[in-house]
Image (tube, rainbow, N blue to C red):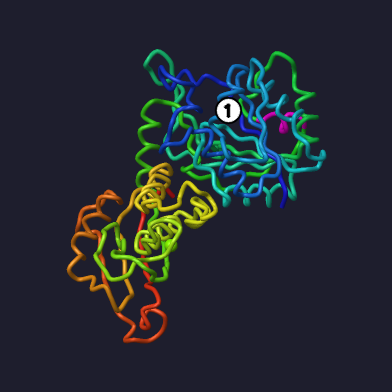
Amino acid sequence: MTFSAIIVAAGEGLRAGPGEPKAWRSLGGRPILRWSVEALLAAGCADLVLVVAPDRLAPAGDALGGLERWKAVAGGTTRAESVQLGLAALKGAPDQPVLIHDAARPFVTGAHIERLLVALETAQGAVPVLPVPDTLKRGDDGLIERTVSREGLWRAQTPQAFRIGSLAAAYRDWPAGEQPTDDASVVERAGGVVAMVAGDPMLMKLTYPEDFEMAEQLVAAQRVVRTGFGIDAHRFGPGAEVWLGGVAIPHDRGLIGHSDADAGLHALTDAVLGAIAQGDIGDHFPPSDPRWKGASSDRFLTHAVELVAARGGRLLSADLTLVCERPKIGPHRLAMRQRIADLLGLPLDRVSVKATTMEGMGFTGREEGLMAQAVVSVETPA
Ligand code: MG
């Protein structure tokens, strides 16, 4: 189902305390507004407009670097004005669904969006809501005036779903000078039917300083372990040593390759890249590039580890198997483990190097070349 989206990030968020406007602060290493943009795009948003303060148009490009199908427009002096400017910037037809979302609710998911779009098929709007579990009091000056029935009361969250044309029309009918607290109230006032769908505590709005601390803890708890696999082989040729696992081993032959031909580190590099779905070693270090001629392979592995760190992730463990008849790996195994542990930033007991022969069979058995296979585990934010 195709839909558009407007993310409103023009407010200053003064209740969040001093510092950057809240949507621009970092959460799990990413700007808070980027969380919502990534989630909406991943859910299939065809056209996303981010409404920001006029002086934030350039920073928006930095915050959303690498993402597509979005543009930033300058907001107005009120939220209602900002939403209308966002609507005017959308490309979709009037009957295209549009989700209006607060940038300060970073944990929106595809499941939330799906529920809203389904409900929109039979209504002019759809809003995620939660029940009110606490007893409600009306009061003033530190004294309760009375207890308010919470029956039939719901807390409205975002994103809220509408159709571009009918939301724009409802805003045109909205009385000048009044400030709606959300978009559903504008459609309600215009006589539209707005459906309630199941909200989620994870759609909470980050408002107060303690909300940001809690969100950081939630992000830290929501980490996933990913596994990556890599394989590489190099042919033997003339030479007096081979590089394997980051260590030079005296041998009566060498390994042929564009770089130092360290099949062990190449397999590990591909395994690390595989764990974060970042292509393979050839994508990052093309053999056609003269810069990598004779290069020491530790820089390939270091680059892959840096890509993990850039995603807020870290290596957990590595297991490398070398397949050859000769040279004998055993005497060099500890040195390889230590070198690989250094490159991966891991303690020695998280790095394994194993060796096997193919009992004389195949290309390794005939000693035409050797092969390496590697498996690594990394942990990244979900
Ligand atoms: Mg290779």
Residue 277 pos. (x, y %): 49, 55
Q: Quadrant of ligand 1?
A: bottom left
Q: Name the amino acid type tagged 1.
A: Ala
Residue in front for this viewpoint, 255 or 160: 255
Using residue 138 as the reference point, say whether residue 189 is left or right of it. Answer: right
Q: Main secondary structure of the magenta part?
A: helix
Which image quarter: residue 176? top right
Of helix, strand and loop, which one carries label 1? Answer: helix
Which image quarter: residue 64? top right
Residue pointed to by mark 1: 60
Q: Is residue 189 magenta?
A: yes
Q: Identify the residue at horizontal 41%, vertical 26% (top origin).
A: 208
Q: Identify the residue at horizontal 42%, vertical 42% (top origin).
A: 310
Q: Identify the residue at horizontal 65%, vertical 21% (top origin).
A: 75
Q: Is residue 309 magenta?
A: no
Question: Over which residues does the magenta segment extend?
Answer: 183-190
